[in-house]
Every structure is written in C-alpha cells, then in structure tokens.
Image (tube, grey):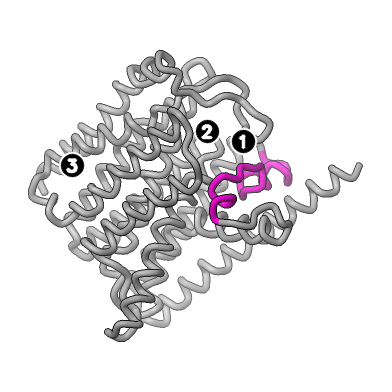
Amino acid sequence: MPGLFISALTAFLFVLLSTPLFRGIAFKFRIVDFPGKRKMHKTMTPLLGGLAIYTGFALGIFMNPGILRGILPILIGSVIILLLGLLDDIRGLSARSRLFVQLVAAMTVVFFGDRINFLPASWWGNTIEIIVSLIWILGITNGYNYLDGLDGLAAGSAVINLGCFAIILFITGQSSLFVLAVVLAAACLGFLPYNFMKARKKVFLGDAGSTVIGFILASIGLVGYWAEGDVVRLSIPILILGVPIFDMVFTTAMRIAERKIKTVGEWLKYAGKDHFHHYLFDIGLASSGAVIFIYFTSILLGLSAIIVSRAYPIMALLAVAQGFIIFGMIGALIVLGNRRRSGDNKR
C-alpha cells in the first residue's frame, strides 16, 4: 500500500483547508445549529463539518481503487447515511423517516457485505445474526450522534477508535479495511481544529458527520475478522467502541426507567443533558477535562482490544475483564453525576 500515506495526507489536507469554505456555504444557506436549552453552545454554529470530512475521505479512498471492491457495501451505505444526515441538518426529518433510511443503509452492509457470525449455520441462526447485525449498525450510528455533544468529542474519539481498529487490521492483514480506517481517521483529524476553535470560527459535524462516522465504525466492527469467531474475539469492536455503546445503553435504560421515552421514535428524537459527558460536568470536570477524560477512557479500552486480538486465551480474558471494569467505572461516574445533579435540583 505505497499510496496510503498520500491518500491519508490528501484527506487530512483537504479537510483542513476546505472546512472554512464549507463553513461559509453553511452560513449562506442557513445550515446551522441554533442554541437551545438542551444544547451546550451559545451561538449559531454551521453544520457542514461532516460533509467536509466525507469529501476528503472519499478523495483519499478513491486514490486506492484496488480496495473499492472489498468495501463497496460500506461506501454505498455511508453515502445513504450522509445524504440522510444532510437532509436532517437542512430541514429536519421525522424519527420514522430517519430510522427507515438508516435501516436501508444497514441492510446494504449486512446483506451485500458481511455480518456477525456466532451461531450454527441454520435459518434461525442466520436470522438472529442478521437482526443482531442490523441492531449493531443502527445502535452505533445513533450512539455516535449522541456522543457529539462537546467540542472535539465525537471527531477526536473517532480518531482514537479508528486508530485502534487500524492497528489490529494492519496486524491481521485486512488491507482494505485498514486503508478505510486510516483515511477516515486522517479526515477527522483535519477537522478537529475547527471543532475546538472559538465560536466565531467553529464548525460542527452535524448529524451528517456524526452518523456517517458511526456508521463506518459500526461496519468495520461487522466486517473485520473478529466478527467470525469465539465470544472473546467478538469483544474487540465492543471494547473499541465501548464509550458510545455504554453511553447509549446506559442513557437509554435510564430514560426508559424514568419514562422519558416509550418508542424507538422517541429514542431517536429525544435530546437531553443526560449523557456520560454531561455527568462528568456534574462531578466537577470542565468541558475540556471531560473530553480528555473520555479520550483517555477510549484509549484504555482500545488497548484492551488490541491485547485481546494478539494474546493467548487467558490474557485475552483478562483484557476483556479489564474492559468491563472500565465500563463499571463509567457507570459509577454516571450514577454519581446523576446524584449530584439530583441533589443540586433539590436545593
């Protein structure tokens, strides 16, 4: 893969240099996010960062035509998700419409690409595997959208998650997915400076950006070698994507318990300050501190996944156990933050 460096550099530089152009287009056509009671930002902010990332990513990928056949279902599905996200950013879509189109994109990968394999080959085994695979893609796609709540959080986490996947993909010789992960990571890295800038220069990923990143990460989690094997190997993508998975599952469970949501549509539409990063505020961390803490947590979980991919069974089990200890710590912090918030509200 002699052209990988050039492809990644192209993606990085394109996004780094073109994002101001996309920012101007977003302002011109009013593709912006307005401040609100359930939002962290205080000023109107453009939303086309995701389109800048995907354009740079596409340029880098098409410089490697030899890998296209192996990742074509992922690319087709990601374009569907991108267009859906852009429409949602521009005019807003119903939860039912979003879910239907996301399901179509997920089917593109599952039926024409690959899926998780952990049950005996039979009609019932295949059916369960297809359902689990579709839920996985839909969950991670939307989980990454929920993660996009602080400056640099989703894009920076994506760089870490993609980097961990890339290391394992390189070691195991999965060249097409390796190029995919590296080029997308480079594109996200080119966007990060604009997500961290002050309000007058800031750009958001938008739903188009956060969902397409989540979709591609979920697809890598399905197509990699770990999707066919024992339960320990299946833990690799779960560990790498542990933060968005745990945040989505824990937050959803709390919302159901508190009767804030009752349907899948309400789950997609509900926006609130009850995610992991919000609770880190409640225990005293500033915005930058919360982002760094989640970066560090993602790195630890990613290292556990890398160990699982290379270690003997007993070491792999210990690495999985380490990952679930980290999940337990995340849960404890969420509960602590929730109690702090409840205590403050009673004063």
In percent of width and height, residue 163 lies at 34, 50
Q: Which residues are magenta?
A: 264-285
Residue at point 32%, 34% (across, down): 53
Res. 159 visible in picture: no
Q: Are marks 3 and 1 in contact (CB under 8 Å)?
A: no
For marks 3 and 1, the one nearer the N-term is 3
Give the image location of residue 282, x and y in percent. 73, 44
- Foreground: 209 or 259? 259
Going by the image, does 243 lie left or right of 209? Answer: right
The residues bearing labels 2 and 3 have C-alpha atoms spaced at a distance of 27 Å
Whole-angstrom CA distance, mark 2 to mark 1, is 8 Å
Q: Which residue is mark 2?
A: 151
Residue 325 belongs to the span the image colors magenta: no
Percent coordinates x, y for residue 272 in the rendering:
65, 43
Which type of secondary structure does the marked residue at label 2 adopt? Answer: loop
Q: Measured along the vertical axis of the image, is residue 46 above or below residue 164?
A: above
**Quick check: 205 above or below 229?**
above
Examine the rendered structure and indicate whether residue 262 appears above or below residue 122: above
Q: For residue 173, what is the image quadrant?
A: bottom left
Label 1: how many Cα within 10 Å (few below 14, some 14–19, many 20+): some
Given the current orientation, which residue lies at the most extreme right position? 347
Task: Say if the magenta span includes residue 284.
Answer: yes
Q: Nearer the viewer, residue 103 or 70?
A: 103
Residue under label 3: 61
Tell me the mark number nearer the camera, choosing from 3 and 1. 3
Which residue is drawn at the image coordinates 40% and 20% (left, top)?
26
Res 287 label: 1
Q: Are marks 2 and 1 in contact (CB under 8 Å)?
A: yes
Instruction: Look at the numbered discs 2 and 3 and tell me whether their residues touch, using CB distance below 8 Å.
Output: no
Tell me which corner region of the image, top left, top right, bottom left or bottom right, holds residue 332. bottom right
In primary-sequence order, the first of circles 2 and 3 is: 3
* Residue at x 47% of width, y 60% of height: 301
